[in-house]
Image (tube, rainbow, N blue to C red):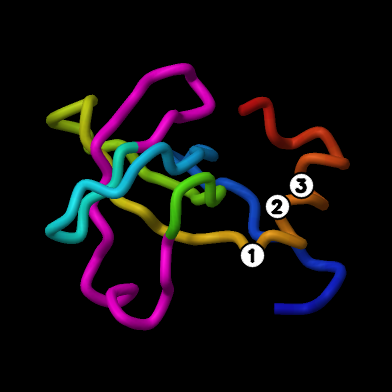
Amino acid sequence: MDEDELRLPEDGEMFARVESMQGANRVEVRCADGERRTARIPGRMRKRVWIRDDDIVLVEPWDWQEERADVTWRYENRVADRLNEEGYLSL
């Protein structure tokens, strides 16, 4: 990804902060809409992208079960700081 390019939420996605690791490739997140959700880390991210508490991620809530979501992206700390400075994060 280009230094000046930020990955922003697309249709159906939102920012979230990881609150805790649940095990079995699941994390508890606090979403930008104020809801807590259990998010699933998809197979394409397992063992390639390491997610920790307080990381900023993009999640896509499930259509059929609003309290669950899929993690679609994890931001590095420096990029998350930049998102915060530019006013995208309200977490």
- Magenta-drawn stretch contains 45: yes
- Please give the name of the residue rendered at 70% of the width and 78% of the height, measured from the top-left corner: 1
Residue type of the residue flagged with mark 3: Leu
Q: Residue 32 location, x and y as percent?
A: 53, 27
Tell me if label 1 and label 2 are in contact, CB under 8 Å: yes
**Residue 14 numbered tag:** none
Q: Nearer the viewer, mark 3 or mark 1?
A: 1
Circle 3 residue:
83
Chain part drawn in magenta: 29-51
Q: Residue 21 location, x and y as percent?
A: 29, 49
Placement of 45 over or under 76, stated as above or below: below
Q: Quadrant of the C terminus?
A: top right
Circle 1 residue:
76
* Distance between the alpha carbons at the discs numbered 1 and 2: 6 Å
- Magenta-drawn stretch contains 37: yes
Q: Callout 2: 10 Å neighbours few (<14), some, many (20+)? A: some
Is disc 2 placed on a helix, strand or loop?
Answer: helix
Magenta-colored segment: predominant secondary structure: loop
Is disc 1 placed on a helix, strand or loop?
Answer: loop
Circle 2 residue:
80
Apparent side of residue 1 relative to residue 74 in the rendered image (left or right) = right
Is disc 3 placed on a helix, strand or loop?
Answer: helix
Q: Residue 85 location, x and y as percent?
A: 87, 41
Residue type of the residue flagged with mark 2: Ala
Tell me if label 2 and label 3 are in contact, CB under 8 Å: yes
Placement of 25 over or under 86, stated as above or below: below
